[in-house]
């Protein structure tokens, strides 16, 4: 699934923010982070690790825990939350995943590669590779 039209703004700001952070220009990273919160309506801290070719298809309402890892080629839709739970760090998302609108992935869990998470699903435990999960709490409905 390729998304090209107008979807790069949040990722571009994140990449600039991350570059500033990694090059010890923390004040610029913080400024960019706050700008993204106020103007774009998304919270993507500079400490998040996002792989290449990731797409935030609709960036409004995205909230990502500051200790989250996202693999290459993953697509996030609007109002996705990748958060901690009970003081834990955020989730580790594999490569080539699709996370549907309104989905919540909570806690220090591992989501495998090529996973599809349905809209408004709440994922609270690990998901193996090549699965589709839906529901509250999320359950595996398809294994490829």
Image (tube, rainbow, N blue to C red):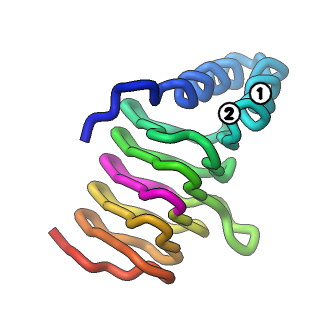
Q: Which residue is mark 1?
A: 35
Q: Is residue 81 above or below residue 45?
A: below
Q: Nearer the viewer, residue 141 or 3?
A: 3
Q: Residue at x 64, y 60 (%)?
A: 83
The image quadrant of residue 45 is: top right
Q: Is residue 135 above or below residue 26?
A: below
Query: Magenta stretch: residue 90 in it?
Result: no
Query: Magenta stretch: residue 94 in it?
Result: yes
Stretch in magenta: 92-102
**Residue 91 marker:** none
Query: At which x and y percent is residue 51?
Result: 43, 36
Q: Nearer the viewer, mark 1 or mark 2?
A: 2
Specify few, some or many for label 1: CA neighbours under 10 Å numbering under 14, 14-19, or 20 or more.
some
Task: Indicate left or right for 141 with 123 as reference.
Answer: left
Q: Are marks 1 and 2 in contact (CB under 8 Å)?
A: yes
Query: At which x and y percent is residue 109?
Result: 51, 68
The image quadrant of residue 42 is: top right
């Amino acid at each position: 699934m390729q998304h090209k039209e107008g979807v790069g703004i949040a990722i571009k700001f994140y990449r600039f923010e991350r570059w500033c952070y990694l090059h010890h220009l923390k004040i610029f990273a913080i400024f960019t982070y706050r700008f993204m919160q106020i103007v774009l309506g998304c919270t993507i801290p500079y400490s998040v690790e996002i792989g290449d070719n990731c797409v935030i298809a609709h960036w409004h309402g995205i909230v990502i825990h500051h200790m989250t890892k996202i693999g290459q080629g993953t697509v996030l839709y609007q109002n996705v939350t990748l958060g901690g739970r009970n003081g834990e760090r955020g989730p580790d998302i594999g490569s080539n995943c699709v996370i549907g609108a309104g989905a919540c992935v909570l806690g220090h869990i591992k989501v495998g590669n090529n996973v599809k998470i349905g809209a408004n699903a709440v994922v609270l435990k690990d998901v193996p590779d090549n699965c589709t999960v839906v529901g509250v709490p999320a359950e595996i409905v398809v294994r490829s």
